[in-house]
């Protein structure tokens, strides 16, 4: 059987994604009930981090432990990855010793190349282009609060970044309409927009995106590696803050999500995380359970 990777949401079909999210919700209930699960006993996950992280590292490491396996943290400064060893060579060696590899890096082509040479599943834990693991948690969270997201309207407010790109993929995969509102010059990938023109629309401002939407989502204005652009971005994004006032334009039962970390007073108002529609903390915890479901699916080839 060919090795399955998870580099974007498009690596799984709709039926697989739906089953994975159902299983993730089961794993959340099972864990909260205090049950012990050893589905990945004696399995090892290698975690390669070229970008720092809180939620990604904690969720993958805790997830492997909760499933009876183990995870090892690898950073460029501690391995030959940071001393010029070719990606192909690293992929061959690391994948010969572990059961799966999780990579958080900058250029997406790095993870594509690693996966091409790996004998075990490779998971994209974030690149500059996509963040599919976060979308699993987001879609799980919406399902647990509102049911299927099919035919809903989602508003993306802010930078056309890796999260926005993954929401564009999700619109097709999960059957919702996506409105993207971002400042001029900060739109998401044009080829990606062209490929999804039937389910994604770029609108003129946050109010137009939010009006009647069932879910509002945002992210920081300057991502890792863009710190030098902070001042320019603060000016460009000043009218793209998500606040209770903006939420008031959405559907009365609309939810709000943010992948965190959040900068209060910038992309969100100081009180937005405590808004009645905010499910940010539930969303953050679901990184753990969605990734446990993903690990079982990729390593075991099944969801039981």
Image: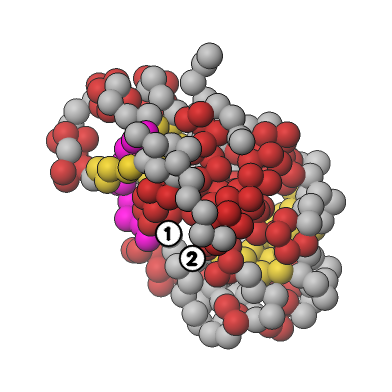
Q: Is residue 151 above or below residue 86?
A: below
Examine the image and state in which quarter residue 180 appears: bottom right
Label disc, if present, on residue 55 of the rendered structure: 1
Left or right: 29 with respect to 246? left
Q: Secondary structure at mark 1?
A: helix
> Which residue in the structure is indicated by mark 2?
260
Foreground of the two, 212 or 276: 276
State which region is magenta: 43-56
Query: Marks 1/2: CA distance?
Result: 8 Å
The residue located at (73%, 34%) in the rendering is 15
- Are dots 1 and 2 in contact, CB under 8 Å? yes
| Image location (x, y in percent) of residue 289 | 54, 52
| Image location (x, y in percent) of residue 151 | 84, 51
Q: Is residue 50 magenta?
A: yes
| Image location (x, y in percent) of residue 276 | 69, 80
Packing grade of label 2 (10 A; few <14, some 14-19, many >=20) is some
Q: Quadrant of the C terminus?
A: top right
């Amino acid at each position: 059987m060919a090795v399955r990777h998870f580099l974007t949401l498009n690596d799984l079909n709709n039926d697989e994604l739906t089953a994975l999210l159902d299983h993730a919700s089961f794993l959340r209930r099972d864990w909260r009930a205090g049950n012990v699960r050893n589905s990945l006993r004696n399995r090892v996950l290698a975690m390669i981090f070229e970008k720092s992280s809180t939620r990604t590292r904690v969720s993958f490491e805790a997830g492997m432990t909760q499933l009876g396996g183990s995870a090892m943290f690898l950073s460029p400064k501690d391995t030959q990855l940071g001393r010029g060893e070719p990606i192909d060579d690293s992929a061959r060696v690391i994948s010969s010793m572990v059961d799966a590899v999780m990579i958080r890096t900058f250029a997406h082509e790095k993870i594509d190349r690693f996966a091409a040479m790996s004998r075990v599943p490779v998971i994209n834990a974030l690149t500059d282009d996509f963040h599919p693991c976060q979308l699993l948690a987001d879609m799980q969270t919406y399902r647990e609060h509102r049911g299927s997201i099919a035919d809903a309207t989602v508003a993306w407010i802010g930078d056309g970044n890796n999260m926005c790109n993954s929401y564009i993929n999700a619109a097709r995969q999960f059957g919702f309409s996506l409105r993207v509102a971002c400042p001029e010059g900060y739109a998401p990938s044009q080829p990606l927009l062209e490929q999804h023109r039937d389910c994604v629309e770029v609108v003129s401002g946050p109010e137009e995106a939010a009006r009647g939407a069932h879910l509002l989502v945002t992210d920081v204005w300057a991502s890792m590696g863009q710190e030098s652009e902070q001042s320019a971005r603060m000016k460009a994004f000043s009218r793209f803050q998500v606040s209770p006032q903006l939420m008031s334009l959405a559907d009365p039962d609309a939810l709000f999500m943010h992948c965190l970390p959040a900068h209060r007073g910038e992309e969100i108002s100081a009180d937005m995380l405590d808004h009645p529609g905010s499910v940010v903390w539930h969303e953050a915890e679901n990184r753990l359970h969605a990734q446990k479901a993903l690990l079982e699916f990729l390593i075991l080839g099944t969801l039981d």
